[in-house]
Image (cartoon, helix red, strand yellow):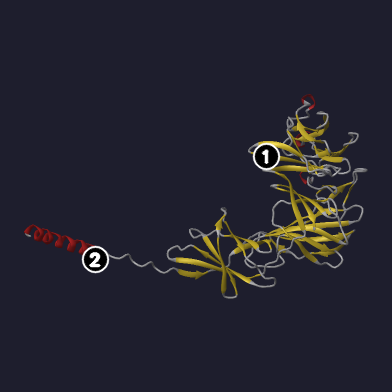
């Protein structure tokens, strides 16, 4: 019995010591409460993606705090919580999916992470979900980096120069069959100009003995069917301007340091009409118009080479489109803000019938227009595209997308929600629009 008693005697202080050591551990301090601070307005942009989805982007430059969550509220009730992602370059975004009610107002409560026990809260009120969808979309061709493009005079093909991992490929898309040809010519094509369905412009050194100067580069055509080239004119190396093909004519700025002239070339017979550089400044030749050949707001008559002003514009008003047969004219005005805060420029548009201005829009900040390169006026209405910048308040009249403007009633209607940069549209029929975008070429069909 004595050994047993001795063992128990030894265990008692060990057990007591272990229990005493456990009880002496200092409990972890309770976390400090986070102080939520309501702060000034937040720049945001809401892009409706469907009846039940909206992407909200925020322009937020503050550090080290980041936007982390968004609470969707109806009146005072929280009806959804959504994660905010950091899209980099000071842009954050959240995708909100919810069964929105038409005509109802909602609020976005945006929260930051806690820094020094403080979390910042922004409240955006009076969001009303509006989604319009007048077109169905079909992607005809994908591109990685659209360098340049052009549509053939027949309007049956689009040539597009695509840069994929520093490999440049010229692609030809049939707008009849949607078939795609991949063309790899052995020539430099910095500016794609479609001369025919199977012919486009190239820049080349095939004519070295005729080079007028070191700043010269030959502008020629390349025929996909025959594989042959045809000389057009001498262009400027690196800084030249070449118009689109209008009525089988093209305007080429010749080498500035070896002549400083501009040529109107007839692509049917190769004849040229040469203008002195002091009459047409090479830098003002416009390269992205299909309705007319422009320099500044002047138009060149391809039939006789005469220069005329189709519209009496003033100030910063620039001609976007002019129909010689109907007298329909569209202008836009952009004015840069000298001391920008949240507004960097203002813009407005106007519609002309002949020399009469029949419509003038409001002037607002950070709005950009995009008018079809080929446009059809239907029932006194035109369709155009506009995008808006970031703002601190929601405005139901500032939703990115396609709009219809009735020139008689002056009424503007949102047709299609769509938010994209660098949209180039060709309104080929009453229902079909070919839209060239950075990621590819789409066919939009009116439903």
How crowded pointer 2 is (Cα within 10 Å; few <14, some 14-19, many 20+) is rated as few
Using the image as rendered, state which of residue 140 and residue 264 is in the foreground: 140
Q: To which residue does mark 1 refer?
A: 163
Using the image as rendered, state which of residue 127 and residue 247 is in the foreground: 127
Using the image as rendered, state which of residue 346 and residue 101 is in the foreground: 101
Tag on residue 296? none
Q: From the top left corner, tell me how far across and down residue 259 is, in percent.
A: 80, 35
Q: From the top left corner, tell me how far across and down residue 419 is, in percent.
A: 69, 57
Answer above or below: position of 252 versus 399: above
Q: In which quarter of the image is the C terminus?
A: bottom right
Residue, x 80% and y 62% (percent of image)? 404
Label 1 vs 2, first from the N-terminus: 2
Answer above or below: position of 168 versus 332: above
- Asked which secondary structure carries label 2, the reply is helix
Task: Indicate the quadrant where residue 395 lies.
Answer: bottom right
Q: From the top left corner, tell me how far across and down residue 246 is, in percent.
A: 86, 44
Task: Indicate the quadrant where residue 151 lies.
Answer: top right
Q: From the top left corner, tell me how far across and down residue 5 is, in percent.
A: 9, 61
Distance (Cα) linking label 1 and label 2: 70 Å
* Residue positioned most to the left: 2
Residue, x 81% and y 64% (percent of image)? 360
Residue, x 74% and y 63% (percent of image)? 132
Q: To which residue does mark 2 refer?
A: 23
Q: Is residue 69 left or right of residue 16?
A: right
Q: Do the residues labelled 1 and 2 touch (CB within 8 Å)?
A: no
Q: In which quarter of the image is the N terminus?
A: bottom left
Q: Is residue 129 left or right of residue 64?
A: right
- Asked which secondary structure carries label 1, the reply is strand
Using the image as rendered, state which of residue 118 and residue 93 is in the foreground: 93
Task: Indicate the quadrant where residue 417 lies.
Answer: bottom right
């Amino acid at each position: 019995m004595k050994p047993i008693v001795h063992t128990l005697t030894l265990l008692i202080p060990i057990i007591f010591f272990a229990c005493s050591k456990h009880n002496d551990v200092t409990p972890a301090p309770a976390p400090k409460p986070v102080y939520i601070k309501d702060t000034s307005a937040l720049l945001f942009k809401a892009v409706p993606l469907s009846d039940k989805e909206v992407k909200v982007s925020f322009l937020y430059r503050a550090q080290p705090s980041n936007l982390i969550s968004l609470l969707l509220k109806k009146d005072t009730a929280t009806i959804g919580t959504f994660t905010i992602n950091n899209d980099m370059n000071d842009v954050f975004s959240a995708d909100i999916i919810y069964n929105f009610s038409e005509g109802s107002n909602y609020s976005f409560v945006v929260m930051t992470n806690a820094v020094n026990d403080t979390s910042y809260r922004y409240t955006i009120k009076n969001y009303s979900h509006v989604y319009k969808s007048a077109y169905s979309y079909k992607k005809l061709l994908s591109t990685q980096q659209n360098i340049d493009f052009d549509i053939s005079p027949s309007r049956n093909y689009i040539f597009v120069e695509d840069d994929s991992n520093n490999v440049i490929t010229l692609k030809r898309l049939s707008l009849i069959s949607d078939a795609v040809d991949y063309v790899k010519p052995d020539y430099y094509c910095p500016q794609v100009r479609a001369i025919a369905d199977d012919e486009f412009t190239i820049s080349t050194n095939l004519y070295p003995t005729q080079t007028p100067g070191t700043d010269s580069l030959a502008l020629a055509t390349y025929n996909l069917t025959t594989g042959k080239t045809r000389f057009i004119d001498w262009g400027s190396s690196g800084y030249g301007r070449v118009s689109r093909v209008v009525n089988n004519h093209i305007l080429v700025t010749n080498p500035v340091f070896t002549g400083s002239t501009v040529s109107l070339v007839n692509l049917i017979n190769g004849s040229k009409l040469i203008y002195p550089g002091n009459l047409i400044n090479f830098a003002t030749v416009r390269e992205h118009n299909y309705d007319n050949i422009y320099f500044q707001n002047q138009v060149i008559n391809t039939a006789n080479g005469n220069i005329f002003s189709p519209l009496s514009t003033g100030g910063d008003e620039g001609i976007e489109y002019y129909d010689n047969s109907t007298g329909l004219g569209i202008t836009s005005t952009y004015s840069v803000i000298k001391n920008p805060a949240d507004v960097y420029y203002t813009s407005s548009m106007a519609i002309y019938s002949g020399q009469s201005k029949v419509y003038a829009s409001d002037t607002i900040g950070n709005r950009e227009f995009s008018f079809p390169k080929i446009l059809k006026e239907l029932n006194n209405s035109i369709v155009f595209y506009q995008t808006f910048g970031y703002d601190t308040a929601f405005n139901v009249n500032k939703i990115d997308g396609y709009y219809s403007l009735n020139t008689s009633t002056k009424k503007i209607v949102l047709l299609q929600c769509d938010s994209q940069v660098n949209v180039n549209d060709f309104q080929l029929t009453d229902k079909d629009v070919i839209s060239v975008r950075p990621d590819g070429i789409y066919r939009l069909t009116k439903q």
